[in-house]
Image (cartoon, rainbow, N blue to C red):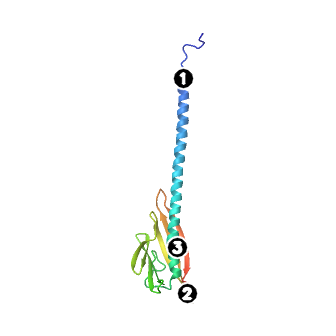
Amino acid sequence: MNNKPKNKKSGYSLVEAVVYVTALAFISVVAINSIMLFQNLFLEMKKNRNVGNAAEIAMGRMMREIKNATDISGGGSAFDSNPGRLTVTSLDNLGTAVSIEFYVENNILKIKENAVAKGSLMPENTLLNSLIFRQISGVRSKGVKIEMTLKDSRGKSPLIKNFYGTAVLRGSY
C-alpha cells in the first residue's frame, strides 16, 4: 500500500533552487577573485625580480669598470645631471688603454668600448628612469657615486626602485 499523498510534487522547490544557485554564484565569485589575486601577485613578483636583475647586471658592470679604471674622463662624462654619462679609461690584458662609456639612450643603459657600441645593459621590460653619476675626488683618490632609478611598467601600477653604489678607482687610493 502506498502512503504517499497523490497531490505532493517530488523534487526541489523554487526556494531551494534559489539557495543553491546563490551558493554556487558566491563560490564562483570567490574562486575567480582568488585567481585574479594570485595573477596580480605573480606579476608583482616578476616585476620585482626583473628590476632586481636589471640593477644587479647594470650596477655590477658599472662598479666593476669603475674599480678597474685608471682614470675618469671629465670631458666625456656628464656628472650631477640626468641622464648622466660616464667615461672611464682602463687597461686591457696587454696594457693597452681602453675607453669605456656608459650612457642612456631611449631610457636604456648602454655601453661603448673604444667608441664602439656594445649593446644594452638592461633586460626587457625594464627602463631607466634616472641615472646620475657624481664624481668623488680626494687628495689621492678618485671615485664615482651612482644613483639609478629603474622602472617596470607592466600591469596596472608601475614598479619603480632606486639603487645606489659607490666605487673608488683601484689605483687611486
State the CA–CA distance, disc 2 to disc 3. Answer: 20 Å
Would residue 12 appear left or right of 75 to someone viewing this image? right
State the CA–CA distance, disc 1 to disc 2. Answer: 91 Å
Q: Position of residue 103 (x, y in %)?
A: 43, 75
Q: Quadrant of the N terminus?
A: top right
- According to the image, label 2 marks what residue? 172
Amino acid at pointer 2: Ser
Question: Measured along the vertical axis of the image, is residue 154 above or below residue 87?
Answer: above
Residue furthest toward the front? 94
Amino acid at pointer 1: Gly
Say which label, 3 or 1, has the lower sequence index: 1
From the viewer's perspective, is the residue at label 3 or at label 1 nearer?
Answer: 3
- According to the image, label 3 marks what residue? 60
Say which label, 1 or 2, has the lower sequence index: 1
In this view of the protein, which residue sits in the foreground, 36 or 168? 168
Residue furthest toward the left? 116
Q: Residues within 10 Å of mark 2 (few under 14, many from 20)?
A: some
Q: Position of residue 89 (x, y in %)?
A: 47, 84
From the viewer's perspective, is the residue at label 1 or at label 2 nearer?
Answer: 2
In this rendering, does residue 137 appear at all? no
Element class at badge 2: helix
- According to the image, label 1 marks what residue? 11
Would residue 151 appear left or right of 5 to someone viewing this image? left
Q: Position of residue 157 (x, y in %)?
A: 49, 58
Amino acid at pointer 3: Gly
Q: Residues within 10 Å of mark 1 (few under 14, many from 20)?
A: few
Element class at badge 3: helix
In this view of the protein, which residue sits in the foreground, 85 or 96? 96
In this rendering, does residue 49 appear at all? yes
Point 42% across, 77% down: residue: 112
Asked which quadrant contains residue 136, the reply is bottom right
Point 52% across, 82% down: residue: 68
